Image: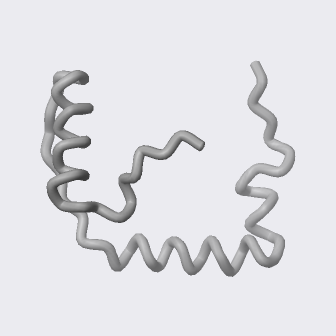
């Protein structure tokens, strides 16, 4: 197993600037308007997500890998 707890969220929550940035990010998420569509088929789900992101020009689904 390669998962390490050192430097994880629990440890970071007690430090600045992470603590204030994390609180700010959680508040931003609370204010979001969230909707969902259930699609059990994984291939259709991936295609639906891409289609919706492109159609609605969603700012938080950019699919960047780097």
The residue nearer to you, when weighing 64 against 44, is 64
The residue nearer to you, when weighing 58 against 9, is 58
The residue nearer to you, when weighing 5 against 53, is 53
| x, y percent for residue 48 | 17, 38
Q: How is the image coloured?
A: one colour
Is 33 displayed left or right of 15 in the figure? left
Direction top: furthest residue: 1
Number of numbered discs visible in the structure rendering: 0
| x, y percent for residue 46 | 26, 32
Q: Quadrant of residue 6?
A: top right
Q: Name above or below for residue 38 compared with residue 62.
A: above
| x, y percent for residue 66 | 60, 43
The residue lying at 74 percent from left, 71 percent from top is 18
The residue lying at 25 percent from left, 42 percent from top is 50
The residue nearer to you, when weighing 58 against 19, is 58
- Please identify the quadrant where the N terminus is shown: top right
Q: Name above or below for residue 8 compared with residue 28.
A: above
Q: Name above or below for residue 31 compared with residue 53.
A: below
The residue lying at 81 percent from left, 77 percent from top is 16
Q: Quadrant of residue 24?
A: bottom right
The residue lying at 38 percent from left, 74 percent from top is 30
């Amino acid at each position: 197993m390669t998962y390490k707890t050192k430097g994880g969220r629990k440890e970071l929550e007690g430090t600045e600037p992470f603590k204030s940035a994390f609180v700010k990010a959680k508040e931003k998420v609370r204010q979001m308007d969230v909707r969902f569509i259930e699609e059990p088929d994984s291939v259709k789900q991936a295609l639906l997500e891409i289609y919706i992101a492109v159609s609605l020009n969603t700012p938080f689904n950019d699919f960047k890998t780097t």
